[in-house]
Amino acid sequence: MAQTEPVLHVAYAGSMGVVMDNAAGPAFAHAHRAVYQGTGQGSYALARLLAARRLQADVFVTITPGPMQVLKQAGLVTRAVPVASTQMVIAYNPRSRFAADFAAAARGEKKWYEVLAEPGLHVGRTDPAVDPQGANALLTLQLAADYYHRPDLLKRIAGKAQNPAQIFSEPSLMSRLEAGQIDATIGYLSAARSHHLPAIKLPDEINLGDPGLQAPWYDRASITLDNGKALHVEPLVFYAAVLGNAQQPALARDFVAFLQSAQGQALFREHGYSPPRGNGL
């Protein structure tokens, strides 16, 4: 039988897999008599694939402005709108042998950075060269070193910026944490809540979630990778845009509007996301 329903292709930041593939995508597809197909990866990796026309999508949903700017420069995006936001936390596996220490840290009875540095504890994160979450993990640790007056904090916990023992693809990171392959990750509160995992909240000065602290605090952080790429803090805001080469442009516009709608925002809230912040790009 011939396919009669239109297919909407959405490329999204890998940490959004649960809300996009299990909630927003199916709800939109049902209401619009369409087929939803999602692809999740690190935002910069996706942006480069899309810009090089090696991946086709109708909508791009990313975190931080940087990946969207890649597509603006490629002529594929003219406008992007904020649809949600989040903050950095320490998420951990409740069955980890270090779970009691993490729980104590969440109660303020232990220092979270001392727990992360315990021998044998396996921290997971994403590649800072291709994924904003990986970059933000390092920037969070650098700000924590300043905030807690622990100059060696970043090196003790992360080792090298692109430490192969800690780096995993973004779509697999939370699955590995759930399966106990890693004990903890430095990542987004939205991802931890979407996967129903416990998390240690961090002070606003280091969680990258308060735009009012950009100049006084977040702008202090800067890390240069071996390839020369400089990492800086950008707002932890999720942006959505219709791509210029969308095969379903009208459906794509409707999907972006859906993410901004009351129903879309309710789905984001249910999955641990905070309201959108700031202006469009």
Image (tube, helix red, strand yellow):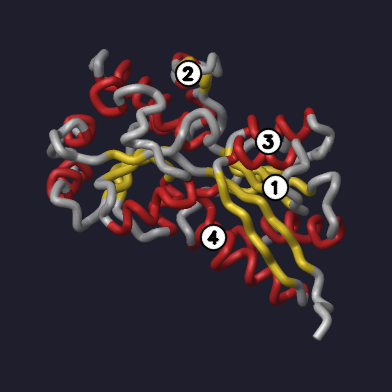
Residue sitting nearer the eye, 65 or 213: 65
Q: Nearer the viewer, residue 22 or 246?
A: 246
Q: Is residue 137 visible?
A: yes
Asked if residue 100 lies left or right of residue 214, the reply is left
* Residue that label 3 marks: 48
Answer with mark 4 or mark 1, whichever residue precedes in sequence. Answer: 4
Q: Quadrant of residue 137?
A: top left
Of the 4 image quadrants, the one containing the C terminus is: top right
223 sits to left or right of 101: right
Tell me which numbered mark, 2 or 4, is placed earlier along the sequence. 4
Q: Are marks 2 and 1 in contact (CB under 8 Å)?
A: no
Residue at image location 13% in from the left, 39% down from the top: 109
Q: Residues within 10 Å of mark 2 (few under 14, many from 20)?
A: some
Query: What residue is pinned by disc 2?
Result: 225
Quick one: SS at disc 4? helix
Question: Which SS class for mark 2?
Answer: loop
